[in-house]
Image (cartoon, helix red, strand yellow):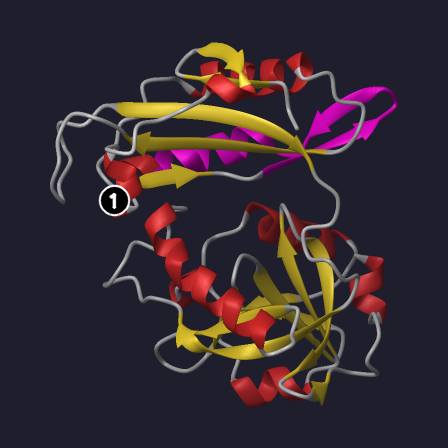
Amino acid sequence: MPKYVWFNGSIVEWENAKVHVYVHALHYGTAVFEGIRGYYYDDVIKIFRLRDHLKRLINSAKIIYMNIPYTIDELEKASIDITRENGYCENVYIRPIAFRGLGEFGVRGLKSSIEVAILAIPLGKYLKSEKVRCIISSWRRPPNDVLPVEAKASGIYLSSNLAGIEAALSGYDEAIFLDYDGYVCEGSGENIFIVKNRVLITPPVYSSILEGITRNTVITLARDLGYTVVERRISRGELYTCDEAFFTGTAAEITPIVEVDHRVIGNGDVGEVTDKI
């Protein structure tokens, strides 16, 4: 268990990082968060695209009418400080979260305080298998005119929670969402790519996905390696019959998908393109 948490501008002991049961976010899901990997290498923890994640945190807050009372520079320093303070010599996962606290009860919560915490915990594999079996969820990813899916907001993740539980109870490793037009969208917490004839295809931003930072990195790396990357809609049947498929995410990293709805993907193992990336 970590020793310390950064909480509202100060480093406090883990057991003292507490909030009241009356906070607005607990009742209405009014929080935004990030998940950031730190890799222990050569006696140093190197944090993956920290500022990009923090920028998305600030933007997510703005979308849901929250103003985080810290700058990106301050949040960056706090993320580094709390990781060092815990004295880790292993890979870590950093979780900044901003949420509506006390001040006003009721749905709006505009007079509630804005609380901010950053914790860092040891983390190995996010998805417990190196190669995952998936199910198309009966739950759909909310469209942009229902919820602002561009924001990494806690309330939106209820659908992910339901999809993930459904997958687990059905004996699968992970769920895959369709959007409201019936096209492949993303996993419960990851972006998705397929490979057809050595071309990488991933759903576009307008298909209700969260615009992933690792997704962006993979697109750049794949193009640098000489692969064509296309952002377009993917049908369910196209997913079943693709040569390769994989998830991307800062927590999930790059995780091969070897089966969807009892259909084996490719040869049922890590694909050549996936392996190179």
Q: Position of residue 131 (x, y in %)?
A: 77, 67
Asked if one can make out residue 30 in the rendered structure from this viewpoint, the answer is: no
**208 relative position to 22: left or right:** right
Q: Residue at x 72, y 60 (%)?
A: 255
Residue 272, x across and y down, in percent: 85, 69
User: Which one is in front, 165 or 53?
Assistant: 165
Please give the residue where the numbered disc 1 appears in the rendered image. 27
Q: Residue at x 61, y 68 (%)?
A: 174
Q: Nearer the viewer, residue 53 or 136?
A: 136
Magenta region = 36-60
| Residue most extreme to the right | 42
Could you tell me which secondary element the residue under label 1 belongs to? helix
Q: Residues within 10 Å of mark 1 (few under 14, many from 20)?
A: few
Residue at 44% x, 24% y: name it: 117
Please tell me whether residue 59 belongs to the stretch shown in magenta. yes
In the image, residue 63 above or below residue 254? above
Q: Is residue 200 left or right of residue 13?
A: right
Q: Residue at x 37, y 17 (%)?
A: 70
